[in-house]
Structures are given as C-alpha cells and as structure tokens.
Image (cartoon, rainbow, N blue to C red):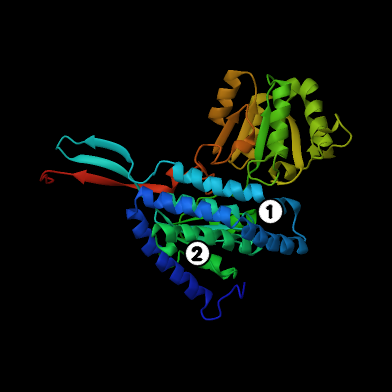
Amino acid sequence: MGNLKPVEASTTAVMAALGRAARAAAHALSLASSKQKNLAIHKAADRMRACAADILAANARDMAAAKANGTASAFLDRLALDSARVEAMAKGLDDIAALPDPVGRILAKFERPNGLLIERVATPLGVIGVIYESRPAVTADAGALCLKAGNAAILRAGSESFFSARCIHDCLAAGLDAAGLPAAAISLVPVTDRAAVGEMLAGLNGNLDVIVPRGGKSLVARVQAEARVPVFAHLEGIVHVFVDRDADLSKAEKIVFNAKLRRTGICGAAETLLVDRACAATHLAPLVTMLLDAGCAVRGDEATRAVDARVEPASEADWRTEYLDKIIAVRVVEGLDEAIAHIETFGSHHTDCIVTENQAAAERFLTEVDSAIVLHNASTQFADGGEFGFGAEIGIATGRMHARGPVGLEQLTSFKYRVRGTGQIRP
C-alpha cells in the first residue's frame, strides 16, 4: 500500500489542492445530466461487486489493526464488512441511481402582479465534506448521494477504516471515469494526519460549503465547535421508547427488543426504556426479563430493580448516556406528561418512540416530542435514510436549520430563484 502520508507535500497543501479540484468538479457536476450521473453510480456498483474480494481483504487489514488496539465490540461491528454488507453497499448505489434527480426540480412557481414570472428551483449545495470514522460503507453512500445531487464530495475516513475506504473509493473513481466525470467529483483524503480534519473545518480556503461528521461524540463535538462552515450533524443518539399505559404487551416486546438489540452500535438504537406506571404491573417485568435473558444489561430505577435482582441501579448519568452497546436504562414514569418531560430533559432530539393503542396519546407524543424522528408503534431502528425511501443517507441531522432527520438527496440541495420578465423596471 505504500506510505499513507505523502512526503512531497504538507497536509495543508494536499488539502488545499483537494479543495480547488473539488470546486472545479462541482461546477461540472452542476451541469451533468441525470443519465451521466446515474451511469457513474451504476458502474461504481458493478466495480464494487467485481472487487468484493479486494474490499474484504482491505477490511480484514483494518479489522486486524482495530482488534490489536483493543477496540470495543460496538466499534468493530460498525467497521466490519462481509459479503452481504458489500452487496448491500452495491445495491445501495443502484438504489440511489434509481431515485429521481433532485436537481432542477421546480419547488414553487408564481406570477407577480407586474407580470414577473418567478420560479424557485433546486440546485446543488456545491462541495460537501464528510468526516467519518469506522463506517466504511459511508464512503459509498456519501459519495453516491453527493454525486446524484450534483455536489462534489471530499471524504475523510478515519485511520481505523482507511484501507476499506480506499478500496471502496477506487470503485467510485472507476464509475466516474466510465461516465466521463471529473475524478475530483468524489475525493478521498489521502492522508491519515488529523490535521486534515482541521483543514476541512477551516473551509479549505472557501472551497467547502458544508460538513457532515459521522462518528463518535468527540469527533462531532469538535466539528460543531470548530467548523467555519455549516454542519449537518447530531452529537449523539439518546433514543427513547415509551411504553404507554395502553400499549399492547406483545407489540411492545417486539418493538423494544428490535429497537435495542437488532444492532446496538447504530445511532437509532434505543438507549432508554420508559414504562408508564399505569401498566408497570403487567408490562415492566416481561420487558425487563426479556432484555436480561437476551444478554442486555439493564440499569433501572427503584421500581425496575424490584422486578428482577439482575437489574443494576441507574444513576442520573445513565439517562444521558448513549451506550451503543447491550446496555439499556429503564425508568417507570407517571404517564405521558412525565415521559415527554423526561425526553425533553435527557434526550438528544434524535429519535423517540411511543408504543400505545391510544391514538390520542400517540398524536400528543408525535406533536410534542421535539425530535428529528418520532415514531408510533415502530422500532427506532427505522431511523435510517434507506428505510425512509431515500435510497441511503449521508447522516442524520438533529439541528433545525436546512436539514433535519435523515439527510438524503433532497436535503443535499439548496435552491435559487429564476425570474423572467418582459422589460419590467422598478419604479
């Protein structure tokens, strides 16, 4: 593989050159046809399938290094690839190509009394920087989504996923070449130097328009604190499931089990279970026992500890913790009002769910809980752009500006106004 860090140029110079090339590529992409962009994405998917063995070999190299460093199991799960995950990445690319092109959509059209015809039209954002750590699949999803929305992408993979990301990026580059699009349309930062992140946060001399961080709390916090360009991000996913007094127990068991244990290392995994005291006598013990028997540690309040000796005491910190592991905090609350208050106090505005057969309670929860994604009678692990029909996502945003929830194609565009006149002047 050779040196990861070029010896002939400083990180600052390398990143400045990436920024300039990406800006030029962004202009070309803004004019590219849907057919051309789709061809690039399909060809990348084809190359990914053909090179699956190479991708898995690169991933094995990353995994071996991560294990040698004593990396946590949840982190390893996000890093690991197998044949099914490689095929899922390739299919994800094909799915993105099949989506409608968001660029050029007429968002609004109206005529003024003076005869001016005004259209609001979707346009690319420009150059998008994506900074991520252990998820090599982000390379494929982010690169293809940015491309389909007419944006150039600068991808900075973490050192722990560097070899996997580089092999996946080679597939994207092959797709761009086959479609006659500039190589700089999707760039992978070629150095593992952490200074490269700082250069991106500074905006690459005005050549970066938005940053999307995908990683742990420390990375996202740094990006949000230091970035000089807009950021689409969530700091953490403190995700709640509230089992209301009118919840069907069988439905609650299925939802809670899936929300917590399907994949514990993703941001949509449930971290806190709230149970209405009005149904605790019938619902709490079965839910807690189910989780414990499945190998999930439970940290609970006094009422929860009373139902099973295996429950550990919960501290205030547990209500604020994103475990990303087989651990869950459980609390009994006094109805819907206290559940909403708990989520508002301890939540992260990411994803929260109510389980209930009471439609009025569900509507109150959906209306009053101020999270990017709120669900009724469905697992929180549906917090995913692919599950929303977006083809894939570049991340989940919990802010309130521009993008919120899964960031897919539509959220990767801005707009401009086109105004057509017949000689009008302003008096």
- Disc 1, disc 2: CB below 8 Å? no
Counting from the top left corner in percent of width and height, residue 267 is at: 63, 45
Figure quadrant of the C terminus: top left
**Residue depth check, mark 1 versus mark 2: number of the one nearer the observer:** 1
SS assignment at label 2? helix
Total marks placed = 2
Q: Residues within 10 Å of mark 1 (few under 14, many from 20)?
A: some
The answer to whether 274 is drawn above or below residue 385 in the figure is: above
In percent of the image, x 71 and y 54: which residue is there? 76
Residue at numbered disc 1: 80
In the rendered image, the vertical position of residue 130 relative to residue 417, given as above or below:
below
At mark 1, the secondary structure is loop
Q: Residue at x 84, y 33 (%)?
A: 305
Q: Position of residue 274 (x, y in %)?
A: 71, 31
Q: Which mark is residue 241?
A: none
Residue at numbered disc 2: 200
Query: In the visual, does 112 lie left or right of 99?
Result: left
Name the kind of residue labelled 1 in the image.
Answer: Ala
Visible residue check, residue 246: yes
Q: Is residue 214 left or right of residue 290?
A: left
- Between 25 and 194, the one nearer to me in the picture: 25
Indicate the position of residue 351 as horizontal and vertical percent values. Answer: 60, 38
Asked if residue 219 is positioned above or below residue 2 in the image, the reply reads above
